[in-house]
Image (spheres, rainbow, N blue to C red):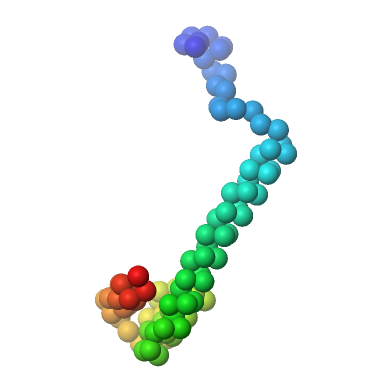
């Protein structure tokens, strides 16, 4: 390891050099496994959501699944932030 001179300023080798094909395949494999895990989570939530009897809770989960932001949900359901947090925690406890 060079401490002085021109060698010290050169970039150091990082990891193993892979071919482009290997890196593309590894990336696609990683993305596929992540998507599979997300699909499993969504299916789990959908199954549990069907068991919920309260319409407000069902609607709350539906808004979350559609990607609504917290502030939008607060306005739509006419609740405050503390109620939102408590509701979300209660839903998580009920699902699991």
**Residue pictured at 31% horizontal, 72% vertical:** 93
Taking 42 as reference, is 6 above or below it? above
Taking 62 as reference, is 31 above or below it? above
Res. 81 in view: no
**Residue pictured at 50% horizontal, 10% vertical:** 2
Q: Position of residue 96 (x, y in %)?
A: 35, 70
**Residue 77, quarter of the rendered image:** bottom left
Q: Position of residue 9 (x, y in %)?
A: 54, 18
Nearer to the camera, 29 or 82: 29
Res. 31 in view: yes
Q: Position of residue 53 (x, y in %)?
A: 38, 89
Q: Is residue 94 left or right of residue 58?
A: left
Farthest residue toward the right? Answer: 21
Nearer to the camera, 72 or 87: 87
**Residue 48, quarter of the rendered image:** bottom left
Q: Position of residue 65 (x, y in %)?
A: 49, 75
């Amino acid at each position: 390891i060079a401490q002085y001179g021109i060698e010290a300023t050169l970039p150091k080798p990082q990891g193993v050099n892979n071919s482009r094909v290997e890196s593309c395949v590894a990336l696609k494999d990683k993305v596929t496994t992540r998507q599979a895990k997300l699909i499993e989570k969504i299916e789990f939530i959908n199954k549990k959501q069907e068991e919920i009897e309260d319409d407000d809770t069902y609607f709350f989960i539906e808004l979350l699944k559609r990607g609504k932001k917290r502030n939008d949900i607060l306005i739509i359901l006419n609740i405050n932030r503390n109620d939102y947090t408590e509701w979300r925690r209660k839903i998580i406890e009920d699902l699991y």
